[in-house]
Image (cartoon, grey):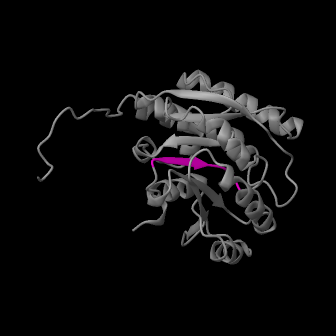
């Protein structure tokens, strides 16, 4: 049996070259899990890290009952790591956060309060602790994305999110998909709520984002989304006789 099926929430954490954050992340998650509003586990997805991230992930998973991991054969990008984690999760809900500790797992409880009524509850980074240039790039990219997708989302880049797993598994994944999670949930006629969460400066490791993947690539991906939106298939099954007595 898939171990995540024993929990109500699986928190997916993609990891790429974050060795210095693994142990502090372990402590944050250990402190949160007993306080979680829903029985929760964590699923680390090692995205082909070239440092000691995988070894440290294996180490902390060995000493924590609710810690699990999977490791991709090669570095495949954030969208692929998220898809791998969502595909593996068998809990009713799936969460997502980054490994950089710029958000805290404690704030998942802010999102879980409303997850029964919404298919996606996501954070908005309050008092964002990033450089002016980084915030400017995000503001421009977010504005262009909202114009193209009409998703009404203020901060799609916030890495703290909780989704209904069945909706998450139906998302059409593609490179850059992580920027369009709200829009892709709306395509399924799902409902979205945005909740302010805390944001902290990065204290270890290095950001994997730069001008190309924070600004230029999202512009290109918006046109991919617009093309896909016109061709998206959405259906509901009203009846069937597939179940055996």
Q: Nearer the viewer, residue 141 or 62?
A: 62
**241 sits left or right of 50 in the view:** left
Q: Nearer the viewer, residue 95 or 210?
A: 95
Q: Is residue 115 magenta?
A: no
Residue drawn at x 47%, y 60% is 6
**12 sits left or right of 213 in the view:** left
* Residue 219 visible within the image: no
* Residue 48 locus on image (x, y percent): 62, 69
Residue drawn at x 55%, y 69% is 72
Q: Is residue 152 above or below residue 116?
A: above
* Residue 183 locus on image (x, y percent): 51, 31
* Residue 7 visible within the image: yes
Q: Nearer the viewer, residue 216 or 18?
A: 18
Q: Residue furthest front?
A: 34
* Residue 130 locus on image (x, y percent): 85, 41
Residue drawn at x 74%, y 57% is 31
Q: Is residue 97 magenta?
A: yes
Q: How many marks?
A: 0
**69 sits left or right of 214 in the view:** left
* Residue 227 locus on image (x, y percent): 43, 32
Residue drawn at x 49%, y 37% is 224
Quadrant of the rendered structure where residue 216 is? top right
Q: Quadrant of the N terminus?
A: bottom left
Residue span colored magenta: 92-99
């Amino acid at each position: 049996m898939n171990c995540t099926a024993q929990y109500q929430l699986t928190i997916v954490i993609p990891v790429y070259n974050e060795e210095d954050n693994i142990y502090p992340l372990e402590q944050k998650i250990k402190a949160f899990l007993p306080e979680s509003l829903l029985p929760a586990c964590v699923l680390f997805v090692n995205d082909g890290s070239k440092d000691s991230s995988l070894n440290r992930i294996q180490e902390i998973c060995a000493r924590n009952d609710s810690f699990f991991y999977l490791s991709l054969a090669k570095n495949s990008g954030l969208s692929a790591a998220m898809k791998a984690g969502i595909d593996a999760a068998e809990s009713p809900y799936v969460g997502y956060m980054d490994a950089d500790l710029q958000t805290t797992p404690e704030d998942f409880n802010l999102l879980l309060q409303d997850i029964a009524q919404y298919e996606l509850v996501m954070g908005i980074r309050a008092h964002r602790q990033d450089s002016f240039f980084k915030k400017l790039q995000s503001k421009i990219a977010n504005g262009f994305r909202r114009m193209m997708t009409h998703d009404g989302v203020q901060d799609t880049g916030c890495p703290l999110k909780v989704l209904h797993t069945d909706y998450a598994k139906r998302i059409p994944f593609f490179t850059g998909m992580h920027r369009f999670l709200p829009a892709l949930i709306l395509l399924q006629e799902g409902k979205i709520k945005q909740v302010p969460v805390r944001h902290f400066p990065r204290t270890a490791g290095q950001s994997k984002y730069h001008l190309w993947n924070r600004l230029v690539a999202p512009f290109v991906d918006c046109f991919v989304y617009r093309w896909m939106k016109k061709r998206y298939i959405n259906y509901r099954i009203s009846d069937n006789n597939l179940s055996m007595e």
